[in-house]
Amino acid sequence: MTAGNSANYDNTASWNGYAATVTEVGTNGGPSAANGTVVTDPAVAGLSKTSVSCAAAGGAVCPASPTVAQLEGAGLTIPALPNGGVITLTIAAIVTAPNGTISNTATVAPPAGVTD
């Protein structure tokens, strides 16, 4: 699984300071549970993440207190992600680039031994 987002904006306007929201959704299509899946979203030029929240559905369980440092570093470990489970990360950010294109890509890594 991978999740990603791109923010494109007018090169002639300054978007520096613009508040942005990035939503990343990960779904386990099974057949196995993927408990211990790790989601990472490294820092990117032009976008400063300020907070991250998590919502779970389908029996999935969010990390207790997700932080931007965890997300951009070693990653957020999802405690429970059963077949059909869904995790939605909502990331608040501030655009720090004066103009251009910002590409933000998250990666979802299943735990060792889990294959589809």
Image (tube, grey):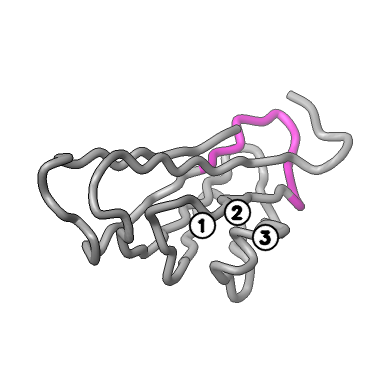
Q: Quadrant of residue 6?
A: top left
Which residue is at the far top?
116
Looking at the image, residue 108 lies above or below residue 70: above
Residue at 62%, 50% in the rendered image: 40
Compute the Cα span from label 2 to label 1.
5 Å
Q: Where does the magenta region start and end?
A: 26-36
Element on which disc 2 rests: loop
Amino acid carrying label 3: it is: Gly
Amino acid carrying label 1: it is: Ala
Front residue of this view, candidates 107 and 89: 107
Q: Are marks 2 and 1 in contact (CB under 8 Å)?
A: yes
Q: Position of residue 54 (x, y in %)?
A: 49, 63
Instruction: Classify mark 1: residues with Cα within 10 Å, few (<14), some (14-19) or many (20+).
Output: some
Compute the Cα span from label 3 to label 2.
22 Å
Query: Nearer the viewer's eye, disc 3 or disc 1?
Result: 3
Left or right: 12 as drawn, with respect to 42 = left
Q: Position of residue 101 (x, y in %)?
A: 31, 39
Q: Quadrant of the C terminus?
A: top right
Element on which disc 3 rests: loop
Q: Magenta stretch mostly in which secondary structure?
A: loop
Which residue is at the far right?
113
Query: Residue 73, which numbered label?
Result: 3
Q: Position of residue 24 (x, y in %)?
A: 45, 47
On the image, numbered disc 2 is attached to which residue?
A: 60
Front residue of this view, candidates 86 and 19: 19
**Residue 12 lies within the magenta run:** no
Residue at 47%, 56% in the rendered image: 89
Query: Residue 56, which numbered label?
Result: 1
Amino acid carrying label 2: it is: Ala
Compute the Cα span from label 3 to label 1.
22 Å
